[in-house]
Image (tube, rainbow, N blue to C red):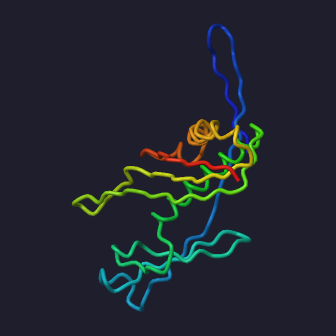
Amino acid sequence: MLATGCLKAAGATFCFMKKMHTYACTLTWTGNTGTGTSAYRGYERNHTISINNKPNLFASSDPSFLGDPTRYNPEELLLASLSGCHMLWFLHLCTTHGIVVVAYTDQPTATMIENEDGSGQFTEVMLRPEVTIAKAKQLSLLNELHHQANKLCFIARSVNFAVLHSATGKIE
């Protein structure tokens, strides 16, 4: 889908076109144990996330909120989304700069605070990518490319908390 618009500035009109993307899934609560939500501890937080032509994700709430610890929870999925988006932008930038990445792992962490009323919010995500590249002379570019990836990542640009990174790089 394309969105268009025009901007008038300095006596000239500038028109632009933006690509719009839409995403869809089906989320189905599977935690009714027979009495619905008649009691706070009387139902499970389990749910299934379905996306066309992809395996289902079996999710729940965090175990701190009576969730199933064997299932993914929304907080973990948000962290994984931020890490994955950063990696994909970083790999793209490496390609455009002629850097051959041969391995990439990340062990990100997220900090969320819970308020007295039960609400909460993430305050920070720390990405910890470990990147292995083919040529030593390109090692000095990696940190800048991580900064650029952070600025370009669709998901990092969409959240209202800091997405930081502490990256390491090494030679194959």
Towards the viewer: 137 or 113: 137
Q: Position of residue 73 (x, y in %)?
A: 47, 70
The residue most toward the bottom is 34
Residue 141 percent across, percent down from the top left: 64, 36
- Quadrant where the N terminus is found in the figure: top right
Rendered view: 52 above or below 44: above
Viewer-side residue, 116 vs 123: 123
Total number of numbered discs in the rendering: 0
Relative to 92, does residue 33 appear above or below in the rendering? below
Q: Residue at x 21, y 60 (%)?
A: 116
- Tell me the quarter of the picture where residue 18 sits: top right
Quarter where residue 39 is shown: bottom left
Residue at 62 percent across and 41 percent down: it is 142
Eyeballing the image, is 106 above or below 47? above
Left or right side of 104 for 74: left
Instruction: Identify the residue shown where x is 69% and y is 39%.
Output: 138
Residue at the spot x=65%, y=41% of the render?
139
